[in-house]
Image (cartoon, rainbow, N blue to C red):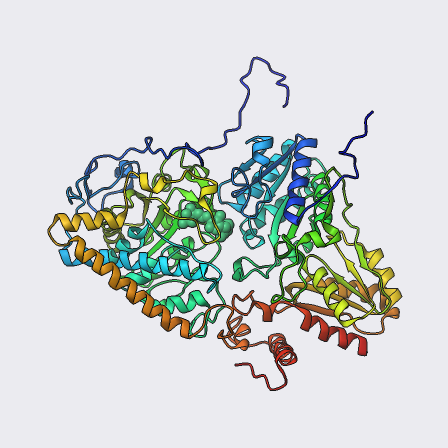
C-alpha cells in the first residue's frame, strides 16, 4: 500500500463550528440512519453555519429544514428513533428548547424505561447556549441543569473544537438521548473573560488541531486541563477558558477540570482531585440557584468532606434573566472568579 | 436504503419542500395568482365561518392594477386619512433605515426592518380603536409609529441607553408600551398568540368593549402556541383578530416549510371554525378593510378572525442575516403585489390628492425628524458606551420585591464594580 496522506493522524486547524460540521459529516457518511433536522439547517446550513454544505453532500432527506416548531422537531425525533433512525436535531438557540420540553422530558428521556427497552431514543439534540454575544435574555441562556435534573438524558458540553468533534460523535453513537450544548461564545475562538480585549482565534489554541477522520471522546470522562495542587476548579464550556486565563493571571497552582459531560458525571476524576487539593470551586455561567454547581457542591461534600479545607465555592451568573446592556456585569468573569479564589484560599 | 420486502408495493418517498428558485436563479413569481378585485364580495360581518370558507382561499383586494380603489371592500377613506396612512408608512420606512444604519455603525447590537410590510402594521392599527390591545411580533414597530409613540423612546430602547424605560434589559426592538396598547415583545416566537386570546377572553368576561389583535409571521404558525390560540379563540368565541404576516420567508426557510405548499395560511381558520380572510398585504386599503371587517365582527360578538396578509419580506431577516445566501436576488423588485408605499402614493396621485413634489418633500421632512430624534436619543447613550442603566436595575423586577439571595448578589455586583473602578464607585 502506498502511504496515504489521509492517515488517521492527519489533522486540520478547525474552529468549533468546523469541528462540529466535520463530526456531523462523518456520522452522516458512516451511519445511514443518521439524519439532521432543524430550523434553517438545510439549504442555508444553519444560522451559525454548523451544517453548511451537508445537505448538498448527503441529500435533502438526510439533512433538512423543518417547520418552526421545537415541539415538532423533538417529537418527530422520538418517532424517527422508534423507527430506527439516529436523529440529530438542532434547536437554533437553547433559549428555544422550551416549546420542545414535553417531548424531551416526558417522552425521549423516559421511553427506554417505560417500555422496558422495547423502544429507545438515540437522539442528539444540538443547541448553541450561553451568553457573551449581546443576545439579550432569549439568546443567552444556559439551561443545562434543567436537563441533568431529568432522569434519562445525557448532557454534554464541549470546550474546544477537538472535544466538540469527539464528543459529538460519541453522543450520536450513544443509544440514549443526549442534549449537546455548544458554547456559542467560543465557536470562533476561546474567550479569556476580558470582553474588551481582542478575540483570539482558535488557530492559536491546541484544541483546534482536529483529526479529519473519525474519533470519539467517550461520554462521562472529564479532562484535566491543568494540573495543580492549590485547589480544584471545575468548569465546562466557555468558563474553562475564562478559568484558565484567571488562574494564569493570578499565578495560582490550580487544578482545572473540564467536566465535558455533566451527566453522567466523571465523579472519580473530581473526587481524586479534590482529595488531593482540599479545595473545590465550580464555575458556570448559568444562574446560581439550583444550578449544576449546587449538585457539585453536594457531591463533593458527600464524598470529600474530611479532605476539605474550605467550603465548596460556586462562581455563577446572577439569578436574573440575562440582561442586554449590562451583560458584562452579569457574566461571571475574571473579577468574580478572582474574588472567589481569594476567599477560598484564605480559608 | 431499505430493500422493500414487498416488491409489488409502491416505495414511499419523503417529500422535502423546495422553493421554486434559489440564489443564481431568476426571480419567478409566475405561480402566484392575483385574482380580480372583488372576486369575492365583502360579506356581512355576522356571517358564519362555514359560509366564509372561500375567502380563506381568495385574496381581498381594493386597489386595482391602475391604483384605483374599487369594489365592495373599498373602505372609503377620506384623502386626509389616506395621507395619514402614507405618512405613517413613510415614517416607518425612514425609521427602519436609520436604525438599521445605526446598528451598522456599531451603536447597537441588533435591528429588524419591516420594509415592504408596512401596511400590515400601519393600516391595521388605523382600523383598530386606539384602546384595542395589540400583541405584536418583533416586526410590527408600525403599530407604535401609527399610535404616535415617541420615536425617541423606541430609539432609547434600541440603544439600551439611560433613557430606555425597559432598563437596557431587552434585545433591541423588543418594545413594551402599555399606554399605547402594545404588549411586551418576547423573543420566543408565537407566545403572544394565546396571550392575546386570553386578553380578549378577559375583556369579554368583564363586559368590556375592547378587542385584541395579534400578529405573527407565517413561519411562526408552526409553533404549537398558534394552534392552542386558534382552539381557545374558537371555543370561547373570543373577540380577537389573529393575523399572519405571510412575507414568504422565515429567516432562510420559505413558506413551504410552514405548510404553504399545501394550502393558504388563512385556511388554517377553516378547521377551527374561525372566520378566515386572505388579503393582499401590500394593498394598504385591503389590509385596512379586512381589519375593519374583523374588528367589527369581534366587537359585535360574532367571534374571532384569522387574517393572512400575503406580502414579501423585502430585506434580510435582521441585521444578522444575508438573504443572498438563500434566495434569488431581485425578488422584491418582481413581487407581483408591488410595494405598499408606492401603491398608496400612486392611488393618492390618481385621486389628485398628492404629487411627487409633496412626496419627496415629505420623505425629507420625515428623515429630518427621525435624525433629530436620533440625536436626542444618542445624547442618552448608545449601546456599550457607559451611559447604560444603573447597575442595580439588573436585580429589580425579577420579583416585585428583592428576596435575600438577590440582595446578596446585588451587593456582590457592587463589590465587583468597586474592585474594577475603585472604592468610590457608586451603583448609579
Ligand atoms: C421559539 C422560537 N424558535 C425559534 C426562534 C428563532 N427565530 C427567530 S425569528 C425566526 C423566523 C420567524 O419567521 P416568521 O414567523 O415567518 O416571521 P418573519 O421573521 O418572517 O417576520 C426564527 C426561526 C425563536 N425566536 N423562537
Residue A101: x, y in percent? 58, 50
Taking A24 as reference, is A298 above or below it?
Answer: below
Q: Residue at x 52, y 65 (%)?
A: A324
The picture quadrant where one finds residue A170 is top right
- Residue lying furthest top in this view? B8
- Quarter of the image with the N terminus of chain B is top right
Q: Is residue B105 above or below residue B322?
A: below
Of residues A21 and B242, which is closer to you in this image? A21
Left or right: residue B151 compared with residue B359: right
Q: Is residue B375 left or right of residue B348?
A: right
Which of A71 and B421 lies nearest the eye of the viewer?
A: B421
Q: Is residue B31 left or right of residue B320?
A: left
Residue B11 image point, x, y percent: 55, 20
Residue A273 picture quarter: bottom right
Q: Position of residue A39 (x, y in %)?
A: 52, 43
State how many labels appear. Answer: 0
* Vertical comparison of A91 with B14: above or below: below
Amino acid at each position: 500500500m502506498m502511504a496515504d496522506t489521509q492517515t488517521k493522524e492527519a489533522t486540520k486547524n478547525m474552529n468549533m463550528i468546523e469541528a462540529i460540521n466535520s463530526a456531523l459529516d462523518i456520522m452522516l457518511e458512516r451511519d445511514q440512519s443518521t439524519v439532521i433536522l432543524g430550523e434553517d439547517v438545510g439549504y442555508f446550513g444553519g444560522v451559525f453555519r454548523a451544517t453548511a454544505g451537508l445537505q448538498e453532500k448527503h441529500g435533502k432527506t438526510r439533512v433538512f429544514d423543518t417547520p418552526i416548531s421545537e415541539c415538532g422537531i423533538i417529537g418527530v425525533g422520538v418517532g424517527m428513533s422508534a423507527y430506527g433512525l439516529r436523529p440529530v436535531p438542532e434547536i437554533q438557540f437553547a433559549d428555544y428548547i422550551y416549546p420542545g420540553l414535553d417531548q424531551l422530558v416526558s417522552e425521549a428521556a423516559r421511553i427506554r424505561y417505560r417500555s422496558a427497552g422495547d423502544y429507545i431514543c438515540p437522539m442528539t439534540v444540538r443547541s448553541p447556549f450561553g451568553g457573551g454575544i449581546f443576545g439579550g435574555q432569549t439568546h443567552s441562556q444556559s439551561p443545562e441543569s434543567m436537563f441533568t435534573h431529568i432522569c434519562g438524558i445525557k448532557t454534554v458540553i464541549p470546550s474546544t473544537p477537538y472535544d466538540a468533534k469527539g464528543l459529538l460523535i460519541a453522543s450520536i453513537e450513544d443509544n440514549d438521548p443526549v442534549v449537546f450544548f455548544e458554547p456559542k461564545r467560543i465557536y470562533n475562538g476561546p474567550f479569556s473573560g476580558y470582553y474588551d480585549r481582542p478575540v483570539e482565534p482558535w488557530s492559536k489554541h491546541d484544541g483546534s488541531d482536529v483529526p479529519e477522520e473519525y474519533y470519539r471522546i467517550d461520554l462521562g470522562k472529564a479532562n484535566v486541563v491543568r494540573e495543580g495542587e492549590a485547589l480544584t476548579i471545575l468548569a465546562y464550556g466557555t468558563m474553562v477558558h475564562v478559568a484558565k486565563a484567571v488562574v494564569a493571571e493570578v499565578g495560582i497552582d490550580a487544578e482545572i477540570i473540564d467536566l465535558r459531560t455533566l451527566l453522567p458525571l466523571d465523579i472519580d476524576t473530581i473526587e481524586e482531585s479534590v482529595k488531593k487539593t482540599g479545595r473545590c470551586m465550580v464555575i458556570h455561567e448559568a444562574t446560581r440557584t439550583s444550578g449544576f454547581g449546587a449538585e457539585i457542591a453536594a457531591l463533593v461534600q458527600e464524598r470529600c468532606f474530611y479532605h476539605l479545607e474550605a467550603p465548596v465555592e460556586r462562581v455563577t451568573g446572577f439569578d436574573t434573566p440575562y440582561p442586554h446592556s449590562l451583560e458584562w456585569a452579569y457574566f461571571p468573569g475574571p473579577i468574580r472568579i478572582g474574588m472567589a479564589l481569594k476567599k477560598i484560599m484564605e480559608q | 436504503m431499505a430493500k422493500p420486502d414487498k416488491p409489488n408495493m409502491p416505495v414511499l418517498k419523503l417529500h422535502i419542500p423546495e422553493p421554486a428558485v434559489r440564489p443564481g436563479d431568476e426571480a419567478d413569481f409566475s405561480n402566484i395568482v392575483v385574482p380580480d378585485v372583488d372576486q369575492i364580495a365583502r360579506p356581512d360581518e355576522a356571517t358564519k365561518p362555514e359560509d366564509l370558507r372561500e375567502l380563506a382561499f381568495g385574496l381581498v383586494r381594493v386597489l386595482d392594477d391602475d391604483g384605483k380603489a374599487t369594489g365592495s371592500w373599498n373602505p372609503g377613506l377620506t384623502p386626509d386619512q389616506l395621507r395619514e396612512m402614507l405618512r405613517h408608512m413613510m415614517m416607518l420606512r425612514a425609521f427602519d433605515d436609520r436604525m438599521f444604519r445605526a446598528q451598522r455603525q456599531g451603536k447597537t447590537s441588533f435591528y429588524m426592518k419591516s420594509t415592504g410590510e408596512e401596511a400590515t402594521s400601519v393600516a391595521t392599527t388605523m382600523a383598530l380603536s386606539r384602546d384595542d390591545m395589540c400583541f405584536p411580533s418583533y416586526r410590527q414597530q408600525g403599530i407604535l409609529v401609527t399610535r404616535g409613540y415617541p420615536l425617541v423612546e423606541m430609539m432609547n430602547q434600541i440603544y439600551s441607553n439611560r433613557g430606555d424605560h425597559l432598563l437596557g434589559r431587552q434585545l433591541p426592538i423588543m418594545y413594551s408600551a402599555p399606554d399605547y396598547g402594545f404588549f411586551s415583545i418576547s423573543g420566543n416566537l408565537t407566545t403572544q398568540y394565546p396571550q392575546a386570546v386570553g386578553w380578549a377572553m378577559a375583556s369579554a368576561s368583564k363586559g368590556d368593549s375592547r378587542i385584541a389583535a395579534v400578529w405573527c409571521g407565517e413561519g411562526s404558525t408552526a409553533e404549537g402556541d398558534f394552534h392552542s390560540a386558534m382552539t381557545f379563540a374558537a371555543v370561547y368565541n373570543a373577540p380577537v383578530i389573529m393575523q399572519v404576516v405571510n412575507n414568504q420567508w422565515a429567516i432562510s426557510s420559505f413558506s413551504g416549510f410552514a405548510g404553504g405548499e399545501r394550502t393558504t395560511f388563512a385556511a388554517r381558520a377553516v378547521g377551527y371554525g374561525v372566520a378566515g380572510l386572505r388579503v393582499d398585504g401590500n394593498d394598504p386599503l385591503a389590509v385596512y378593510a379586512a381589519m375593519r371587517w374583523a374588528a367589527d365582527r369581534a366587537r359585535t360578538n360574532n367571534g374571532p378572525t384569522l387574517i393572512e396578509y400575503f406580502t414579501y419580506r423585502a430585506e434580510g431577516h435582521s441585521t444578522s442575516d444575508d438573504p443572498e445566501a438563500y434566495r434569488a436576488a431581485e425578488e422584491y423588485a418582481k413581487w407581483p403585489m408591488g410595494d405598499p408605499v408606492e401603491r398608496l402614493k400612486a392611488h393618492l396621485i390618481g385621486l389628485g390628492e398628492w404629487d411627487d413634489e409633496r412626496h419627496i418633500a415629505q420623505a425629507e421632512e420625515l428623515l429630518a425628524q427621525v435624525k433629530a430624534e436620533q440625536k436626542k436619543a444618542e445624547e442618552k447613550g448608545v449601546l456599550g458606551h457607559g451611559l447604560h442603566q444603573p447597575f442595580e436595575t439588573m436585580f429589580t423586577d425579577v420579583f416585585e420585591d428583592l428576596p435575600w439571595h438577590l440582595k446578596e448578589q446585588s451587593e456582590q455586583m457592587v463589590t465587583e464594580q468597586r474592585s474594577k473602578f475603585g472604592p468610590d464607585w457608586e451603583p448609579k
